[in-house]
Amino acid sequence: MSHLLSRRSMLATSLSAAAAGVFASAAPLKARLRPALCAYSFREDLQKGTLKYEDLIRISAENDLDGVDLTVYWFPNTSDAFLLPLKRTAYRAGIEIYSISVRTELTKPAGADREKAAEDLKKWVDVAAKLGAGHIRVFGGKIPEGQSEATAAGWVADMLGTASEYAGKNGVVLGLENHGGVTDRADTIVGIVKKVNSPWVGINLDTANFKTKIYEQIETIAPHAVNVQVKAMVKDENGPAPSDWDRVAKMLVANHYRGYLALEYEEKAPALEATPALFKKLREVCARHSA
């Protein structure tokens, strides 16, 4: 009996070593960009009630997208009665609810306000986990009057560090967006993420939120991107211009980003009329830059 066990142990060890060798020698993962819809694109319809979140899933499916990033501002509530049917609708449509986008203000010193903000973020982690979303877009917030950028950035890092522990236990990544205020500059955002130093915290890249040296700052962020929202237009010191999605995609692929590019439409024409052509372009960009 002991001889048999010994042989089994040796065989198991050999198989484990062989498997380890296969994985160690495997080629790096291929580039993979996936087209998606950010719910904020249809904010006016959601506000008016002319569209519901289920309709955005249908629109995504009709336009051959892979996922939806659900901006939660117009959720009627966060009860199971709302969330679970929405999750079922997405599953039946073959659309992944891969992210939710929430408002946060993380530039808060230790105290009651920080504790409340932390509890609110925990609530959204619970919502994301229930929907099956692996990512939450969060804002850093404004730099409080009389405080330095460095101090405010430190507070954000402190809050994200604590939040990452809870998010990680629920399998949810937190993506800090470049959204003005304390996240106005790429270097500061990268510094926050590096200080947190958690696999559950990265950067939610918005391609149109920088107002100077847009593509240089995007390139700084690209190695840390965990989600990407693309817009039709950008505006810098030279004025408005179409967003160069191919240029952004090349940067992302060069930095081994694999994941979604979600259209966040913010132009004047009605979203239902303008987005189909943009979805088509987005699908083409994703296909062109995926192996």
Image: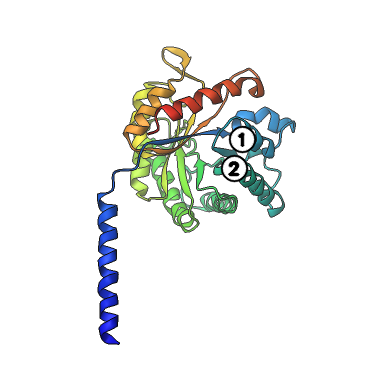
Quarter assignment of residue 76: top right
**Where residue 63 sits: x, y (%)?**
59, 29
Identify residue type, mark 2. Gly
Q: In this view, does 10 lie above or below 219?
A: below
The image's mark for residue 94 is 2
* Residue 165 shows up from this direction: yes
Give the number of callouts.
Answer: 2
| The residue positioned farthest toward the bottom in the image shown | 1
| Left or right: 51, with 38 as reference point | right
- Give percent across and percent down for residue 134: 50, 48
| Mark 1 or mark 2, earlier in chain | 1
* Type of amino acid at the residue the image marks with label 1: Ala
Placement of the C terminus among the 4 image quadrants: top left
Whole-percent x, y for residue 90 in the image: 63, 44
Q: Disc 1 designates what residue?
A: 61
- Determine whether the residue tagged by mark 1 lies in a helix, strand or loop: helix
Q: Viewer-proximal residue, 223 or 177? A: 223
In this view, the residue farthest toward the top is 238
